[in-house]
Amino acid sequence: MRRYLDTLLAQNRVRVVDREVSGRFELAAVTQRSQRESDAALLFRHVAGSRYPVMTNIFGSRPRLTELLGGNKSFCRRWTEVMATPVVPPVDVAEPDGLQEIRLSDLPQITYFELDAGPYLTAGVFLANEPNSNVPNLSFHRAQIISDSELRIRLGGPHHLTLYQAQAEARGQALECAIMLGPPPELLLAAAASIPYDESELEVAGRLAARPIPMRRCRTIGLSVPAETEIVIEGRILPNVRRPEGPFGEFLGTYVPVGDNHVFEVSAVIARRDAIYHALVCGSPEDLRLIELSVATRVYQALLAANQRGIIDVACVPNVLSTVVQIEQMYDGHAKQVMLTAMGANHDYNKSVLVVDEDVDINDFNDVWWAYLTRGRADQRALIIPDVPGFYRDPHKDFWGRLGIDATVPFGRKAEFLRKRIPGADAVNLADYLTC
């Protein structure tokens, strides 16, 4: 992560904030304001009450994620290619020099939203081993900071870590777990991926890095963590203990109310001497790009598995509840078949599926919606499927139902819908023309 941030700094792709900011709302406010006009990463050098700088929005750009995969093809296609490469298992190394034990209260205490219950860890990657097979799992979960010895976390229903904890709890055992802040970028991408229960995200990270991930032993628990991680919180998820957590402003844009959630008992916090803290504003482009990684690649692979032809790429815009599939049309009705296959690929997030042609920018919802409005009748190109269960945490069925939209050119009439263009417009550098 340090090398990646240094690379972005050298390329002037990081906005640096040198003035001191408060961790209570101000850091999140500056981040949100910056994200509205730029996908640049941010580095806050001085956060009140902590000696550690904060980086954020480092993964808030789809092109940067594609660069991390080592290619300039469509993101989903490149991801599928990388996942087909040979497994690269991690390798054990000695503990690096310069690590020191600190307290949770030494870290930046960041409160993001107006009604949040207090400071939260939002970019932590959780590492735990499956209780029976010891296969390691990486995943994201929010954590409310209660004290130097206690975090309260929410484990979502479909997550593998939730199943791990339930197995340990059934035996009356705590589940050892490490929370990593600022692991190597490949670990963070692997944590966002959707892979089968019995596969290891550490091996996925090795594929992404094209090298073995060096792992060191934790000091207080029987786990190994990536040696290059900036900050590691060691501890255990306690069995049969639930305590109030929340409210918290989550990725859907609303608050999750107070609930009785799991308790993480902190046994040590180990940091590099010059550690950089990774913070993530939930629901921001950085958060949504990482969730999109999981949703879009899962839909893309489901389409390939169903032998759907002409699939170019998949994105989630304007948010992760809306899937956009880009295709090269092969036959009449092609878009509708793709639409229905995509709907069945993910039970939680595919509330709407829109299918577009190859000339549409699937990362720009304005362009996607333009295609729907201009390429045929609105009343004949939308499909509503009622009463389909939606997002797993949905007691009032607000996420039930599916909407499918065919926004492609009517088959066989491509020439009639040729988009106008101005030659050379994309290559113009306005600085060469403007005087003020």
Image (spheres, rainbow, N blue to C red):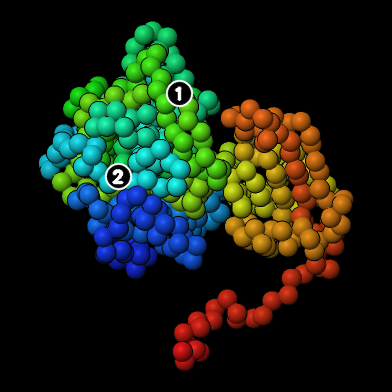
Q: Nearer the viewer, residue 90 or 164?
A: 164
Q: Residues within 10 Å of mark 2 (few under 14, many from 20)?
A: many
In the picture as drawn, the residue positioned furthest to the top comes out as 171
Q: Tell me how far mark 1 sits from mark 2, CA to CA.
A: 22 Å
Classify 210 as above or below 129. Answer: below
Say what amino acid the circle numbered 2 marks: Gln
Residue 82 left/right relative to 300: left
Please state the horizontal and vertical placement of residue 416, each as a whole percent of the image: 84, 68
Please state the horizontal and vertical placement of residue 183, each as a whole percent of the image: 31, 42
- Residue drawn at 36 percent across, 24 percent down: 263
Toward which corner of the image does residue 106 lie, by quadrant? top left
Total labels: the figure holds 2
Say what amino acid the circle numbered 1 marks: Asp
Q: Nearer the viewer, residue 163 or 211?
A: 163
- Residue drawn at 25 percent across, 53 percent down: 48
Please state the horizontal and vertical placement of residue 276, each as a whole percent of the image: 26, 50
Residue 412 left/right relative to 56: right
Q: Is residue 252 visible?
A: yes
- Residue drawn at 46 percent across, 84 percent down: 431
Q: Nearer the viewer, residue 35 or 81?
A: 35
- Describe the element under mark 1 as helix, strand or loop: strand
Residue, disc 2: 109
Q: Is residue 71 visible?
A: no
Q: Nearer the viewer, residue 121 or 374?
A: 121
Classify 429 as above or below 2. Answer: below
Q: Earlier in the sequence, mark 1 or mark 2?
A: 2
Mark 1 and mark 2 residues within 8 Å of each other at the beta carbon? no
Please state the horizontal and vertical placement of residue 52, each as a whole percent of the image: 22, 50
In the picture as drawn, the residue positioned furthest to the front comes out as 115
Residue, disc 1: 260
Q: Residues within 10 Å of mark 1 (few under 14, many from 20)?
A: some
